[in-house]
Amino acid sequence: MLPFTREQFFDVFAAYNRAVWPAQVLAGVLGLALLALLLRPSRAADRLIAAGLAVLWAWTGIVYHGLHFSRINPAALFFGALFVLQAAALCHAALRGGLHFGSSRTVAAALGWALVGYALVAYPLLGLWSGQRWPALPMFGITPCPLTIFTFGLLALTRGRVAWWLLAIPLGWSLIGGSAAWLLSVPEDWPLPLSGLAVLPLLRRRDPPPAGVAPAR
């Protein structure tokens, strides 16, 4: 059993969206900017994409989980700490150049683009179709579930193996958030656990790049 009702859950989104406006617009712009960087691969773009993801994870951990969701769910403080830890991991990857982004003609890349498109476009449309309305609508980039799907999409659009410590927290949240979505009847979140379970084996089966050599673009 969840410690809150569906009505309380969406009331949090309504209060959150009113409080942080226009962060929703800025998050959308940032998401599109990260995709633009992905289409022009470079070492600088790799670092900026990882850093941009880190900003979204830190915001969601502190502002959504810590300041808003914790009002109805004490576990949100723990979730917020994990989201901030994920932001730190992404910052570490950005500083050390541990992620190499770029599209390719692979199953992983096709899945990555599908997840990115879902998080940016299909996710809010499915929410509207299911009867959710502004401001009680989970928004891209600043709420956990679409952010996690978007993150899996971007990680699928990398070259080389992705470190397990960059995948552990998103995978954990995909299972937690996905199970809650079924209990609360949030259809746009139903693909969440599948996104992590589908991406994980594709990323971990890759061969790591040779030491000191960036993957080919």
Image: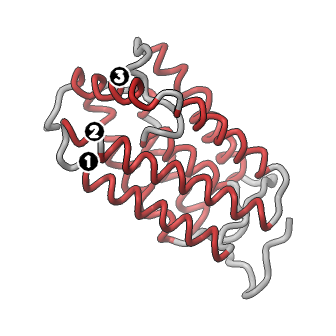
Which badge, 1 or 3, is on the more N-terminal residue? 3
Q: Which residue is mark 3?
A: 14
| Circle 1 SS class | helix
Residue nearer the viewer, 11 or 158? 11
Could you tell me which residue is drawn at 56 percent across and 66 percent down? 91
Mark pair 2, 3: CA separation? 11 Å
Q: Which mark is residue 69?
A: 2
The part of the image, by quadrant, that contains residue 118 is: top right
Could you tell me which residue is drawn at 60 percent across and 68 percent down? 162
Q: From the viewer's perspective, is 190 left or right of 105?
A: left
Residue type at the position of mark 1: Ala
Which badge, 2 or 3, is on the more N-terminal residue? 3
Task: Locate residue 53, reporting x and y percent.
Answer: 58, 53
Badge 1 vs badge 2, beta-carbon distance below 8 Å: yes
Residue type at the position of mark 3: Ala
Q: Which mark is residue 147?
A: none
Could you tell me which residue is drawn at 78 percent across and 57 percent down? 102
Q: From the viewer's perspective, is 59 left or right of 110?
A: left
Q: Which residue is mark 1?
A: 76
Query: Up-down: is 154 above or below 25?
Result: below
